[in-house]
């Protein structure tokens, strides 16, 4: 049976080759990613007065690429509006890509600190990167404005070198539960979220707060990050027949979920509530359109809150659509950096003095009036309740209620 | 009881519609892999390109059903150009060289598409005819997914007929087995391979156009679908058409029902099952038919 043997050998070697090529793909991916990461960024250094150097670590490739680009665009807009100067000192922004991977983030932060000798560091979307950077900047005593939103950053992982001009996940999860209880007490809520750190925190805080109010929680569904098909999940939710669903998905997951939410005719039958990221004005709503109509979400960022009006207008005239969370985050972070520089006469590197200057008085940002909590350096923020309503040219997150000046429970939580 | 039946029926249809997508996605890859022994990791780029073409086509208001041929032609054209240079020069090279070439190209295409179209997530505007639902035992099921299932079955059948039941398919299979002999019959095998690659790229584009309604389109989708296609093809078994069909069904059902039964461990459960399957049947579900003399 020479033929059969040959055929067997050929088949198994072919499948081995395909498996090997899949493995090779992953390895090549790593090589390619590293090569891209190593490409040096041009850093012109010709200013007469030594410019203020700001380093930004954000995700310009990988799953959060679109968010990272928005963050950078927001920061760049603020710099352009300031004439590339803070307190009359030229500002130089150096942006590095962490690819949403903690090890890359650490490497890039070390590069910005050691090689580029930045005066201030800011950025980060992914919570894992943020927690990894926390140790690096604390060890290097690097003044950092960290924009990840894991609760621990305002609690166990507090650092004297870190200020946080953004939300914590608790702020959104707990306010969503409060709102649900206030508007529909006694409703039975099931939850559905992406199964990673952020999803666990949003849903955990929602469930805990909702149960403290005496609310009823049904099944809790978790799906892997990056699910291709939400049909099975939606069919399972439909079979549960809850009064309402609390969701957290981000990016393409959010788009797929909301689109299929409408396709499976759950829209209008079950009330949909969620975190603002799942209904992000820039990232998600333009794609899903009326599939999200009527959904309620809580968010610190709002295209319709009065405090953000000037920024929204400027962002739109810069040729983009309505801003979402991360463009606003980048811009607000820039506003805080500018305030820090101005309040210290152009030199924010004396960190004890800069911190104190920011603790002394709130900063007016696109997130609204932003005081910092001296216990943990965490911003105290207005949290808006949005309803997605139709507007000319699309749908828009419309503020229906605001929980003013929310403070994370902090280190004692 | 009808509740449970309806639930089971809808979840089965969910699995079938996802399998149809996997089948469409895997067919293009398996055609070049099994027929030409060429590893094309740029296949995901054809998929994403097809998604974008369909989304823009559906946005213009032109007859909606033409979006699918348009995506097929656009990706097929890209495939034809790539076949002339550089794919043709790599058919005889080892797989590792093919992997390097096509993976590098896929990175370039990803950047080009991101540069031209942007990083935002796009969804197609489906025509009214595909937006409805049908009620099956009182449970709603989207018409679009039935359309996906039908498209998967129809295209699968068409391709099977073409490759297994026509003289052209016979020439192609013969050319793969022994190119020299086929050349002596006066057949230009280079042209045959060109046609296969165009067909594969076109299928990639077409499945992207169909899949955009479920998956949306954004930078990075190309890699995700490439991975799914590789899993489908490897599980099914290389070198046979039936293998890809079986692979798509098994992977589709595994991924769907793992979400139904163990939502928290969906990927773990599904891929553990697939790994076990490969351990038991290293050549894949359907061993390729004997084609060598």
Image (tube, helix red, strand yellow):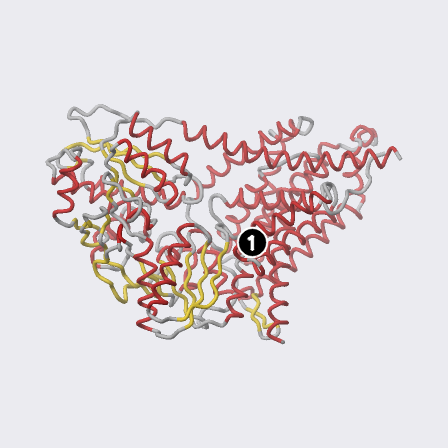
In which quadrant is the C terminus of chain B drawn? top right
Q: Is residue B54 left or right of residue A147?
A: right
Question: Outermost residue toward the front?
Answer: A412
Quadrant of the image occupied by residue A291: bottom left
Image coordinates for residue A381, horizontal then vertical, percent: 23, 55
Question: Outermost residue toward the right?
Answer: A1
Image coordinates for residue A275, horizontal then vertical, percent: 36, 58
Q: Residue at x 69, y 57 (%)?
A: B153
Quadrant of the image occupied by residue A127: top left
Image coordinates for residue B249, horizontal then vertical, percent: 67, 54
Query: 10 Å neighbourhood of mark 1: few (<14), some, or many (≥20)?
Result: many
In the depicted structure, whether residue A41 falls above or below residue A365 = above
Helix, strand or loop for disc 1:
helix
Q: Residue at x 52, y 58 (%)?
A: A230
Image coordinates for residue B280, horizontal then vertical, percent: 72, 45
In which quadrant is the N terminus of chain B drawn? bottom right
Observer-nearest of A360 and B48 = A360
Observer-nearest of B65 and A277 = A277
Q: How many marks?
A: 1
- Read off the residue under disc 1: B266
Q: Residue at x 29, y 42 (%)?
A: A146
Q: Is residue B72 left or right of residue A37?
A: right
Q: Is residue B44 left or right of residue A307?
A: right
Q: Is residue A242 left or right of residue B23?
A: left
Observer-nearest of A225 and A308 = A225
**Which subunit holds the residue at mark 1?**
B
Q: Residue at x 78, y 30 (%)?
A: B179
């Amino acid at each position: 049976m020479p033929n059969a043997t040959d055929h067997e050998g050929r088949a198994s070697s072919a499948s081995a080759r395909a498996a090997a090529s899949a493995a090779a793909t992953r390895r090549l991916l790593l090589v390619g990613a590293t090569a891209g990461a190593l490409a040096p960024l041009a850093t012109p250094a010709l200013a007469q007065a030594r410019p203020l150097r700001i380093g930004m670590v954000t995700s310009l490739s990988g799953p959060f690429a679109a968010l990272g680009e928005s963050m950078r665009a927001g920061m760049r807009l603020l710099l352009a509006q300031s004439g590339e100067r803070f307190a009359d000192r030229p500002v130089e922004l150096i942006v590095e890509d962490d690819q949403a991977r903690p090890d890359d983030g650490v490497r890039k932060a070390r590069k910005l600190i050691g090689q580029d000798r930045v005066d201030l560091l800011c950025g980060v979307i992914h919570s894992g990167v943020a927690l990894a950077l926390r140790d690096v900047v604390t060890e290097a005593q690097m003044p950092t404005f960290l924009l990840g939103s894991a609760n621990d950053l305002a609690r166990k992982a507090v650092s004297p070198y870190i200020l946080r001009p953004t939300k914590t996940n608790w702020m959104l999860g707990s306010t969503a539960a409060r709102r649900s209880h206030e508007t529909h007490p006694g409703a039975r809520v099931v939850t559905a979220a992406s199964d990673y750190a952020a999803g666990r925190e949003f849903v955990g805080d929602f469930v805990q707060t909702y149960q403290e109010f005496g609310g009823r929680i049904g099944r809790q569904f978790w799906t892997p990050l990056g699910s291709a098909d939400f049909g099975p999940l939606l069919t399972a939710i439909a079979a549960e027949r809850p009064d309402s669903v609390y969701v957290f998905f981000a990016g393409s997951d959010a788009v797929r979920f909301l689109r299929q939410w409408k396709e499976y005719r759950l829209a209008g039958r079950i009330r949909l509530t969620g975190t603002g990221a799942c209904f992000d004005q820039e990232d998600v709503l333009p794609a899903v359109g009326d599939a999200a109509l009527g959904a309620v979400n809580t968010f610190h960022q709002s295209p319709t809150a009065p405090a953000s009006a000037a920024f929204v207008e400027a962002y739109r005239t810069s040729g983009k659509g309505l801003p979402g969370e991360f463009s606003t985050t980048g811009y607000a972070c820039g506003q805080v950096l500018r305030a820090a520089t101005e309040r210290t006469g152009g030199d924010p590197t004396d960190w004890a003095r800069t911190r104190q200057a920011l603790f002394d008085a709130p900063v007016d940002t696109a997130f609204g009036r932003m005081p910092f909590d001296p216990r943990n350096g965490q911003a105290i923020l207005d949290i808006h309740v949005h309803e997605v309503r139709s507007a000319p040219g699309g749908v828009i997150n419309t503020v229906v209620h605001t929980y003013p000046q929310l403070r994370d429970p902090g280190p004692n939580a | 009881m009808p509740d449970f039946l309806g639930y089971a029926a809808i979840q089965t249809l969910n699995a079938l519609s996802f399998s149809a997508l996997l089948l469409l996605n895997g067919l293009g890859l398996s055609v070049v892999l099994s027929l030409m022994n060429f590893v094309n990791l740029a296949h995901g780029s054809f998929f994403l390109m097809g998604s974008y073409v369909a989304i823009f086509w559906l946005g213009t208001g032109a007859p909606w059903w033409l979006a699918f041929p348009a995506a097929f032609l656009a990706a097929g054209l890209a495939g034809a150009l790539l076949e002339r240079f550089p794919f043709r020069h790599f058919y005889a090279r080892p797989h590792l060289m093919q992997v390097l070439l096509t993976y590098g190209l896929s990175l370039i295409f990803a950047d080009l598409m991101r540069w031209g179209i942007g990083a935002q997530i796009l969804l197609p505007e489906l025509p009214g005819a595909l937006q409805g639902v049908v009620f099956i035992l009182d449970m709603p099921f989207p018409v679009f997914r039935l359309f996906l299932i039908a498209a998967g079955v129809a295209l699968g059948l068409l391709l099977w007929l073409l490759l297994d039941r026509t003289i052209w398919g016979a020439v192609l299979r013969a050319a793969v087995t022994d190119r020299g002999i086929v050349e002596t019959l006066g057949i230009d095998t280079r042209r045959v391979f060109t046609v296969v690659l165009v067909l594969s790229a076109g299928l990639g584009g077409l499945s992207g156009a169909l899949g955009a309604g479920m998956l949306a389109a954004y930078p990075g989708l190309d890699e995700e679908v490439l991975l799914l296609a590789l899993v489908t093809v490897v599980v099914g078994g290389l070198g046979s058409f039936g293998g890809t069909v079986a692979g798509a069904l098994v992977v589709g059902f595994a991924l769907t029902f793992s979400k139904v039964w163990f939502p928290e461990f969906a990927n773990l459960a599904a891929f553990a099952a697939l790994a076990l399957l490969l351990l038991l049947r290293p050549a894949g579900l359907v061993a390729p038919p004997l084609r060598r003399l």
